[in-house]
Amino acid sequence: MRTLKIKELTLDELEELEQDLHENGEKSDYGYYKQLVTIYETMYKKLKSLARKNGPEYDYSLQYTKKLLVTHLIKFGTYLKMNHFKDDLAAVESLIKAIGLEQKLPIAYYRLGFLAYKHGKYGSAVRYFQQALDKHLVDDPTCALNQQQKFHAHMYLANSALYVASQTYETIEKLPYSPMEQLPNPELSPLLETLSSNENYLRNHAFYKITKNKTVTCSKEACEDLYENSENNELVLYFNDRENILLFNGEEVIITPTQANMIRHFLLSSSRENPCTRITMRDFFGRTGSDGEVRKKTFIKSIERLRVSLRSIDIPEIIDVTQYRGETGYYFNDSIPYTVMFMVDDAFGNDYVPSL
């Protein structure tokens, strides 16, 4: 459906389209997350207009839709061009949109700082990391930084400032009208040594590596090495800086972020005693059904699509079904070992990371 057409739909029609997208999943390599974001943007604009005209009657729906929009911009903005592959420019544009809607988003500023740093925009990185660490911005715990991210933010902030200082001195040296002998002799060597040391730390602690009994941080190179040399019958879920890959016995499949995050959730947060239901996994599905929860059909179909992806590389049945508090529940049956690897700056990852 064209974007123009989406903007012409009523709120009820938009909600139906949203449910159809969640129920049917990603049908191609393009457009799924872009459509979801466009739906939420359109809903938000319509509800904002209604709230302005009719007062508090629409306040709850307006705030709920705003939260959905902001969450999707932060978590899926990098996938707006292609469903399976990350794009830094799309991520930056989406994060800026998110903080335009809601300023109290430390994780959004952190992500902007990380992307600015990655692309050598150190002045912007300084500003974003300062905002990420602003204690007055902490509001929604789901958008807060975990301890590792806070530490990294300080390290990135220090390095960004050092890069700015170093570049400034290099510029001064080139000025024809300001000879360096008129200035105090800048001792940059200790600063550059600190910068190098910080870079090494950040590089060596860029990823989380989680197994059943252990959570550590490691470098991208260590992740790549494990990925290339995984054990037989070990499931590896790797969120790298480009895509999300599932690996088992030398066979791999690139999966969507929704499926990758669901698999991570099953591996790290489910058990027979604590299965996942449509209620506990509502945050994976956006707007809820008439009972205030995810539609049963939507939830069950998403699990079946997940199983299809697992079977595509001959992963045995690792997700079992049970009944839990009157709901159909699913859980990882612990039948095979696993390793999950994802970046420290992952906006999804806080729920799965203990204090290190």
Image (cartoon, rainbow, N blue to C red):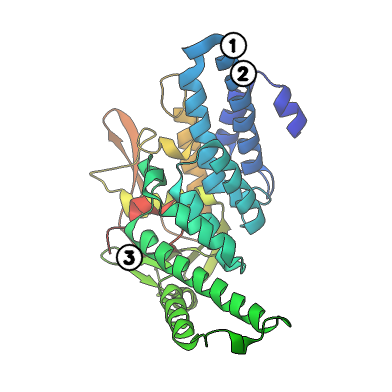
Front residue of 153/344: it is 153
Residue 50: percent from left, percent from top = 59, 15
The answer to whether residue 102 is above or below residue 233 is: above
Residue 53 is tagged as 1
Q: Nearer the viewer, residue 98 or 341?
A: 98
Separation of residues labelled 1 and 2 (CA atoms): 6 Å
The residue located at (38%, 44%) in the rendering is 136
Q: Earlier in the sequence, mark 3 or mark 2?
A: 2
Task: Indicate the secondary structure of the residue bearing disc 3.
Answer: loop
**Residue at mark 1 to residue at mark 3: CA–CA distance:** 53 Å
Q: Given the image, on which type of amino acid does mark 1 rest?
A: Lys
Residue 256 in the image: x percent, y percent? 56, 52
- The secondary structure type at the circle numbered 2 is helix
Q: Residues within 10 Å of mark 2 (few under 14, many from 20)?
A: some
Whether residue 116 sits left or right of residue 340 in the image: it is: right
Q: Which residue is mark 2?
A: 49
